Amino acid sequence: MKKSYNDSIFGQLIRLALPVIGGSFMSMAYSFVNMLFVGKLGADSVAAVGSAGFFINLGWALSSLITVGVGIKVSHANGAGNKVLAKSFVLNGKIALIVLAILYLSVLMFGGKYLISILNLKNQQVEALSIGFLIRSGWSIPFTFLNNFYSSVFIGYGNSRIPFRISSLGLLLNILLDPIAIFGFGLGINGAAYATILSQMITVFLYSRKLRLLQGDVDQRISYQKAQLRELLLLGMSPTLQRMVFVFIAIGMARIISNWGTEAIAVQKVGVQIEALSYMTISGFTSALSSIAGKAYGAKDYVRQWKSFLAGLTIAMVVGLTTTVVFMAFPEPLFSLFLRDSESLRLGKDYLVILAYSQLFMCIELLSTGAFYGWGKTYLPAIISITLTSARIPLAYILTTCCSPTLNTIWWCISLSSMAKGLLLTGLFFLLFQLFMKTQTVTDGKKECQCTGG
């Protein structure tokens, strides 16, 4: 019977994760497809789009203030069988998210030029292209925020098929519109921004329609509640800070990397896209684990919560090791999909080989993050990630200044910090949850004794 129970957890994790993985790749593919077409315009265009992408990603991080919490609370309410509570969290989260999106859009519209200047690109043409692309791409922010929100809600309900289908349709639209706008209308990189805006608008419409069908008629008892918004913000604050700090650290690293020229900037942007092969794959399992563990926690089935973590950890190790082998075996063919000049290929090959060593650790770090999210402890992954990721900048500066002034030194700083995060966060979850399980056993045993004695 135990084997059957474990298999059911493992099977459920895979069934929920596969559409999430597909949806994650579809979300990533928006920028991936843009980069693929923009790459045909040259390294300057790639550097411009990638630089503007820092602040689009910052918006994604900011949306976590609501999206992370709503996913967790919906899964907890779903596990407890409280559908009205789940609907209420969705309503309150959506109101807050729309306000947040409008505020961030205003920042991009009025401060885009200043934001790009922070990167110190040292190339006026690239800087001008990047500013224009950022301002135009900014109009996709409200739709991107809502798409992330709806995806988290559906996964919280345990339905990952709908986000996958809608994201797939959005990607197909983007693929069709990109070459038409970029080359057909001669809009260059700005055409990529327009294509993304239109495809994101359509997906928002589809998501809202499907959510109404899933939830049914809204109960009259559901209204705006400050207490629920406070809960969402408390859950989302640490992940948001973590993701925003990560973007700022990436910007700091980009300033250091810019000392090696436009090719180095382009290589780093493309390298991140390729590395997303493992990142997005395991992120799907992270979201699935967060939903399954959150539902188990809401139902107070802590044994199932623990077993779901072990099943996810096994998958993370397989994904990490497989990616390591692929990156080490085929670094140049992977990079040649985006950049063709010999210098970029040489730098790109070094990037992938060095980052290959950290793929396993990155995967178990993300998986453990999902386990903590399902548990409702979002602050612990944030503390570890912020501390160790922040160390990249001083470490890179010191090593490139005093020891080895090469681009590979920077790649090693990134890789080593990922290794440390994976080991520490996974070990911490093992320790803390085992202590939690012992506490629950003792507590439940006391309750059982009291009941029997009565």
Image (cartoon, rainbow, N blue to C red):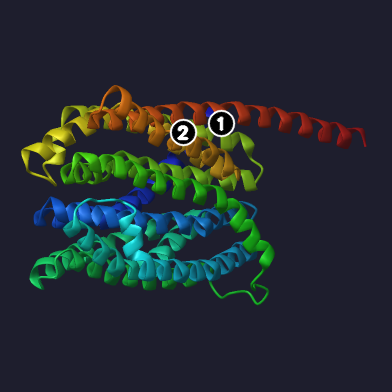
Disc 1 marks a residue whose amino acid type is: Phe
**Which comes before the other along the chain, label 2 or label 1?**
2
Q: Residue at x 64, y 72 (%)?
A: 224
Q: Which residue is mark 1?
A: 429
Q: Is residue 386 left or right of residue 105?
A: right
**Residue 374 occupies which quadrant of the picture?**
top right
Along the viewing direction, whichever of 137 and 453 lies nearer the viewer: 137
Residue 29 seen: no
What is the CA distance from the residue labelled 2 to the residue labelled 1?
A: 17 Å
Disc 2: CA contacts within 10 A as few (<14), some (14-19) or many (>=20) = some
The C terminus: image quadrant: top right
Is 330 placed above or below 91 here? above
Q: Secondary structure at mark 2?
A: helix
Is 176 placed above or below 450 here? below
Along the viewing direction, whichever of 111 and 146 lies nearer the viewer: 111
Q: Residue at x 44, y 27 (%)?
A: 420
* Numbered disc in front, either 2 or 1: 2
Q: Is residue 124 left or right of residue 322?
A: left
Residue 177 lies, in percent from the top left, at 18, 68
Q: Which residue is mark 2?
A: 388
